[in-house]
């Protein structure tokens, strides 16, 4: 059975002070979790303070991006080695905002994935189609291609450690989420692809998340789908009550 995973992608929101204020409010909502993992991905500047504050709690911390080299002349970049040393356990890779706004290529995502696996940082690799591609019926081919390019040349034994996130770009920050059935169909096809790259039992153990306008009200509907293992949450993760509501949707009824 796959443990549900809820990831908060704060994007470029919350300074250190704001992040700690969020955590105080969040802890008033929820302290214990059962059969579920929760990861906060704040901006780099808040990682250390959050890591310290969350020590001894079930909540973990991840980065939103990283470079593929451990050190060197790469002004403004952050090394996987630095993240690992700080205790960061997860990293989001290939988010559509990085692909679209910062020109991140499949080749770079492939190198970042290799570096994360090398450092034993759990990668959360994002894939997803634009509105145009969605309307043209290209979703399945595009998502498969993005996965294939990310996986090229990776060490086979590392593949089960990869977490995938299906984030249709037309659903990000728009309030226009995919339906649970649409997301299930794409995520099921992703698992099928993974069973070809690995094998069926391994693909069954790998976690695949949905992201795009996830809210506390809608979470349960997605979680009823057999292949959706949790969420990558943007906007709603900035609100302690709403984010706690999404986590509660994964918990067994009392
Ligand atoms: P929203 O939840 O704001 O749509 O953002 C989704 C996202 O991009 C998470 O990575």
Image: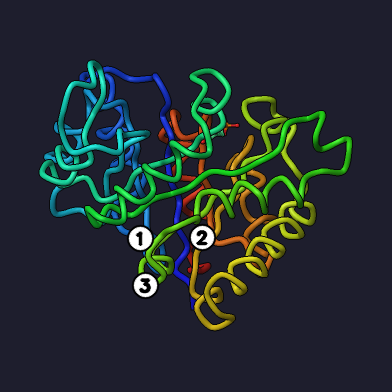
* Circle 3 residue: 157
Packing grade of label 3 (10 A; few <14, some 14-19, many >=20) is: few
| Mark 2, other Cα within 10 Å: few <14 / some 14–19 / many ≥20 | many
Residue 207 drawn at (x, y percent): 50, 63
Task: Kindly identify which numbered label has been placed on residue 250.
Answer: 2
> Vertical placement of 31 versus 8: above or below?
below
Give the class, few, some or many, for how many residues have Cα within 10 Å of label 1's Cα (few <14, many ≥20).
Answer: some
Q: Position of residue 116 (x, y in %)?
A: 30, 49
Eye-nearest disc, 3 or 1: 3
Which mark's residue is nearer the viewer, 2 or 3? Answer: 3
Of 210 and 198, which appears nearest the observer? 198
User: In this view, which residue lies farthest toward the front?
Assistant: 153
**Residue contact between numbered discs 1 and 2, judged by CB atoms under 8 Å:** yes
- x 44%, y 44%: residue: 244
- CA separation, marks 3 and 1? 30 Å
Residue lying at 33% horizontally and 20% vertically, measured from the top left: 14
The residue under the point 22% across, 53% down is 119
Residue of label 1: 33
Spatial CA distance of label 2 from label 3 is 30 Å
Q: Would residue 91 appear left or right of 197 to someone viewing this image?
A: left
Give the Cα distance between marks 1 and 2. 9 Å
- Disc nearer the start of the sequence (2/3): 3
Q: Secondary structure at mark 1?
A: loop
């Amino acid at each position: 059975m796959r443990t549900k995973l809820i990831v908060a992608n704060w994007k470029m929101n919350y300074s250190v002070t704001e992040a700690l204020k969020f955590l105080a409010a969040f802890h008033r909502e929820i302290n214990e979790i059962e059969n579920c993992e929760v990861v906060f991905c704040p901006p780099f500047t808040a990682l250390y303070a959050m890591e310290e504050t969350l020590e001894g709690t079930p909540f973990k911390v991840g980065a939103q991006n990283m470079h593929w080299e451990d050190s060197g002349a790469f002004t403004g970049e952050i090394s996987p080695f630095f993240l690992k040393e700080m205790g960061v356990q997860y990293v989001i890779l290939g988010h559509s905002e990085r692909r679209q706004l910062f020109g991140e290529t499949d080749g770079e995502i492939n190198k970042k994935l290799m570096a994360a696996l090398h450092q034993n940082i759990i990668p959360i690799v994002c894939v997803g189609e634009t509105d145009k591609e969605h309307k043209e019926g290209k979703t399945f081919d595009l998502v498969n291609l993005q996965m294939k390019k990310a996986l090229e040349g990776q060490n086979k034994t590392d593949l089960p450690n990869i977490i995938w996130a299906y984030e249709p770009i037309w659903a990000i920050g728009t309030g226009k989420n995919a339906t649970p059935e649409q997301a299930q169909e794409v995520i099921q096809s992703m698992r099928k692809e993974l069973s070809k790259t690995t094998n069926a039992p391994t693909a069954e153990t790998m976690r695949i998340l949905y992201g795009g306008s996830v809210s506390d009200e809608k979470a349960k509907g997605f979680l009823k789908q057999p292949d959706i293992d949790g969420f990558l949450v943007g906007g709603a993760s900035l609100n302690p009550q709403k984010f706690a509501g999404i986590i509660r949707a994964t918990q067994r009824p009392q």
